[in-house]
Amino acid sequence: MDLQKIANNMSKEDLIFTYQGVVNDVIVGDILQLVESALNAEEIKSKVKRKIFRVLLEGIQNLYKHQNEISEGENSEEEVTTVLIRNSGHYTLIFGNYIAKSEVDTLRERIDLINTKDKSQLREQFIETLNDNERTKDGGSGLGLMDIARKSGQPLSYEFDEVSQKLTYFKLIVKINKDG
């Protein structure tokens, strides 16, 4: 995903934070520190600030855990995107990374299922999945997505942009209401 496209579609005042590149332990820490500083400069409720930070932390951990290692010509397939945007009634976090095209349907189904659950159902599913310790072939269990939905209190939006026959760019869009 090209951050320039996002930047062109909004005023500079609305972009709070952007990062596009490879993620490692050091960069995760740096991103969290930079966003924490940016959020401290915002005049927002501490409850909303905590939600944003918690969703950001889980989203970045997911990006880090699921960085794709498929080689595709000149594409930087390990590159991820993190964006924090201020909107009129909410904040938007966008997380993006490359995934194998074969993973699209499973990921779409997982997010759609999460979006059908209310807060208590999502909590129950989270605990059940945690206790069952079920893992996918890449080590995931969907807990990260459930946790993001739980923490944001909003349905998750997503987009898949086909890059090649093998590769798709996945974008997760999370909204957090300014009222908390």
Image: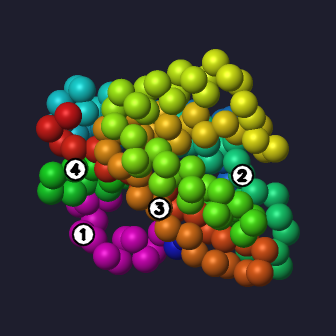
Front residue of this view, candidates 12 and 59: 59
Which residue is drawn at the image coordinates 48% and 33% (left, top)?
Answer: 147
Q: Which marked residue is nearer to the observer: mark 2 or mark 1?
A: 2
Separation of marks 2 and 1 at Cα, in angstroms = 30 Å
* Residue 142 pos. (x, y %): 61, 40
- Up/down of 125 relative to 13, above or below: above
Q: For the residues labelled 4 and 1, say whether their Cβ atoms are less than 8 Å apart.
A: no
Residue where numbered disc 3 is placed: 158
- Up/down of 114 relative to 120, above or below: below
Residue where numbered disc 4 is placed: 90
* Residue 140 pos. (x, y %): 70, 39
Residue where numbered disc 2 is placed: 67
Separation of marks 3 and 4 at Cα, in angstroms = 17 Å
* Residue 34 pos. (x, y %): 44, 39
Res 62 label: none
Mark 2 or mark 4, which has the lower sequence index? 2
Separation of marks 4 and 1 at Cα, in angstroms = 16 Å
